[in-house]
Image: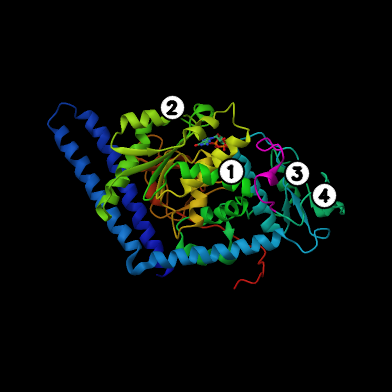
Amino acid sequence: PSLHHEEVRRRVETDVDEFWRYMKSKLHKLRELSRGKDTELIVNAMLEDGQALHRSAVNDLYALKNVDDIDEWRLKESLELGEIIQKRLNSLQHPKNCQKAKLFVCEMKNNCGFGCQLHHVVYCMITGYANNRTVVIPATHWQYAPSGWESVFQPISAPCLQANGVFPERDGHNILRPDVSSLVGVENDFPINNDYLPLAVPDDIADRLLRFHGNPAAWWIGQFVKYLLKFQPSTQKAIEEGIKRLNWTTPIAGIHVRRTDKVNHEAGKHEVEEYMVHIDEWYGQLKERQPVLKKRVFLASDDPNVLQEVQQKYPGYDFISDQEVSKSADPRNRYQLTSLYGVLQDIILLSRCNYLVCTFSSQICRLAYELMQTYNGDASSNVQSLDDMFYFGGQTEHIMDVREPHVPREQGEIRLDWNDSVGIAGNHWNGYSKGRNRRTGETGLFLAYKIKDRLKRAKMPLYNVKES
Ligand code: GDP
């Protein structure tokens, strides 16, 4: 299919979803106002039939996406381009002479969860890629694994592996030591620009990527996650044994319920019902495409009580979850090796789900989404977030273009005109999005379908590795 065809098809997908989100949210309000009145029955019928119509449209679009087996082509493209990026990363990270190579030291000093730390290394790697520098991790004590990164993962740069706590001597300006806890140092060290940061993708692969994928930035970030998640045999064994206990089969949907320390500090609490509404809808769609013998849901959570709750509330579902893993995710146990194995197992399994509901405010959910892209053709719409839109910590402003003007109707809404663009703040998943009109400076709500993504391209080194 041409790029134009794919862009139009993805637009229709978004329009269908935004339309139904809008209608559903308004109909719910209308139902509240019609309680006990004759109109209540009509509203109920509209909700039920609207849902069925939406499901039908989604399934038609699903079929359209794979007409003439285009999905096979997408998968081939995704794997081929992925292979190219992996080769480039390998070559960048394995310089022939580490004494001469320009290094970029990625310190692991910040005290945050595993997802936060892994994303931090991704940030370093993207900076390294864009500036032609080999990234190295100092072999200091690491809170998750006392014997360091390499005791769990394969070294990210075997030739430049640190020996005895000292990197090879070199002249000062060839080695960069950004202040990692704030990352401000990175910008200071590269004052030229930071246009390479997500959600930008390298200009030389942008066209190819945009043709087969609906969220190029997530695919691109996913390649770095994939590069980093190469395990040592002991890690591999621990994770495989964990997965074996779970009796994993597909098709399967997944939910990541982030609780404990996150709730009320960094993110709101979402009840299991909010997740399951989407899972219900997804299984409703799947049933029209293929027989579904058992509705299976993989549950990952840092709160071991969630499993019992969903089992009680949803007896029609088979929930699969590793209770040992959820227990080890307790904030008090968090920085231990067993906890690290557990969270790795959960991230991998979440990324293997055919459909996933989670909160993009959580780095675990975003990691699973990013990783998911690397072994699918286009899984950009296989995840539903209950809060944020997809983002990358430290990203530059996410700009979207206006495709239709918006005239404010209610308080809190802002005007959008032709040719305006917005710095997007979030989608409220009720038909509305929030953002800042970059021309007027006003921040507020508008109908979500009225804006569309603008892909940011950044010139990066070309890495002429043999890309057979
Ligand atoms: P965030 O706080 O959710 O954005 O993600 P972080 O990875 O930065 O910190 C959360 C930490 O909580 C993780 O690193 C895990 O240790 C733990 N955690 C959160 N959710 C899960 C889960 O579903 N499974 C497991 N095993 N651990 C989790």
Under mark 4, the amino acid is Phe
Return the x and y of residue 163 as percentages of the image width and height. Answer: 81, 48
Q: Which residue is mark 2?
A: 305
Residue at mark 3 to residue at mark 1: CA–CA distance: 24 Å
Mark 2 and mark 3: span between their CA atoms?
Answer: 37 Å
The residue under label 2 is which amino acid type? Answer: Asn
**Residue at 65%, 72% in the rendered image:** 466
Q: Position of residue 331 (x, y in %)?
A: 57, 28
Q: CA distance from mark 1 to mark 2?
A: 29 Å
Tell me which numbered mark, 3 or 1, is placed earlier along the sequence.
3
Which sits earlier in the primary sequence, circle 2 or circle 3?
Answer: 3
Residue 323 visible in this rendered orientation of the protein:
yes
Q: Is residue 210 left or right of residue 145?
A: left
In the picture, the quarter occupied by the N terminus is bottom left
Q: Quadrant of residue 278?
A: top left
Nearer to us of marks 4 and 2 is 2
Real-space CA distance between mark 3 and mark 4, rounded to the nearest whole angstrom: 10 Å
Q: Element type at marker 1?
A: loop
User: Which one is nearer the viewer's eye here, 466 or 342?
Assistant: 342
**Occupied quadrant, residue 61:** bottom left
Q: CA distance from mark 4 to mark 2?
A: 46 Å
How crowded pointer 4 is (Cα within 10 Å; few <14, some 14-19, many 20+) is rated as some
Q: Is residue 423 visible?
A: no
Q: What residue would you read off at disc 3?
A: 139
Report the residue marked by disc 4.
167
**x and y percentages locating residue 181 in the rendered image:** 70, 38
Q: Which mark is residue 393?
A: 1
Image: magenta residue range: 142-156
